[in-house]
Amino acid sequence: MNLPMMTKEKKTDIIKRFATKGLFPHQFAFTLLIPVRNIFLSPKQLIERLELKNDLQVMEVGPGPGYFSLKIAKKLFRGKLVLADIQQEMLDYAKRRIEKKGLSNIDYYLCDGKFFRFEDNTFDRIFMVTVLGEVENKEDYMKELYRILKKGGILSISELAGDPDKMTINEIKYLTEKHGFQLYNIFGKEKNFTINLKK
């Protein structure tokens, strides 16, 4: 890892954020591309859990460097994938990887941490993998995600073992159901799971 031109305090802060709770540092984005992640959740498994069809409008919240994004964009060859992240550096990293593959059905959206500048009922699917626990304004996000999800659309939240910000199934159900989402299905168990909710 290379952390050039930084004070010792800044480097220490980044390393601490990598190992503990909070926003995942973009300087460690490369660690999110390690294929061993497939043991916990593979892109193929996620595609099946999302019930993806090739013409859907999909948003991935917190894609990092795009570990799942490439395979999902390929599946959506008649649809669109929007990558939404609060860190421009993560979006830039994902964009470089995706452009090398020649995919053009992806847009990139920099989040402000509260609101999403999209019309009501825009997306068929919204998903996030090991992201929700890092979100500072969870209540605002849930209101916004409900607003921009189409009626009958799926909000999919996956949590994996080892993530210091991991939320439990019950915590996610409580947070989402009070904003109008209804439980659709759950894959896996408390250690590694995907919970799908419908609008």
Image (cartoon, rainbow, N blue to C red):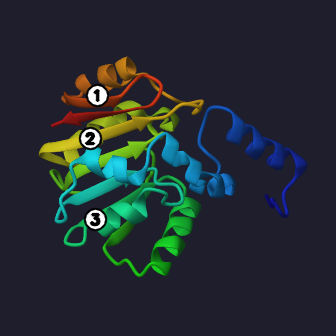
Near mark 2 (Cα within 10 A), the count class, few <14, some 14-19 or many ≥20, is many
Residue 71 at x, y percent in the picture: 38, 63
Judge whether 1 appears above or below 13 on screen. below
Left or right: where 61 falls relative to 153: right
95, 117: nearer the viewer: 95
**Which badge, 3 or 2, is on the more N-terminal residue?**
3
Residue 154 at x, y percent in the picture: 21, 42
Name the residue tied to disc 3: 75
What label sits on residue 176 in the rendered view? 1
Residue 11 at x, y percent in the picture: 82, 49
Q: Residue at x 36, y 25 (%)?
A: 172
Amino acid marked by disc 2: Leu
Left or right: where 180 falls relative to 15: left
Judge whether 162 appears above or below 61 on screen. above
Give the image quarter of residue 197. top left
Near mark 1 (Cα within 10 A), the count class, few <14, some 14-19 or many ≥20, is many
Q: Residue at x 43, y 22 (%)?
A: 190
Give the residue furthest to the right.
8
Left or right: where 22 falls relative to 81: right
Q: Residue at x 54, y 31 (%)?
A: 161
Tell me the quadrant of the picture where the C terminus can be found: top left
Q: Nearer the viewer, mark 1 or mark 2?
A: 2
Specify whether residue 184 is in view: yes
- Estimate the spatial distance between the alpha carbons at disc 1 and disc 2, rounded to whole Å: 9 Å
- Estimate the spatial distance between the alpha carbons at disc 3 and disc 1, rounded to whole Å: 27 Å
Q: Are marks 1 and 2 in contact (CB under 8 Å)?
A: yes
Specify whether residue 114 is in view: no
Tell me the quadrant of the picture where the N terminus can be found: bottom right
**Which badge, 1 or 2, is on the more N-terminal residue?**
2
- SS at circle 1: helix
What label sits on residue 155 in the rendered view? 2
Amino acid marked by disc 3: Lys
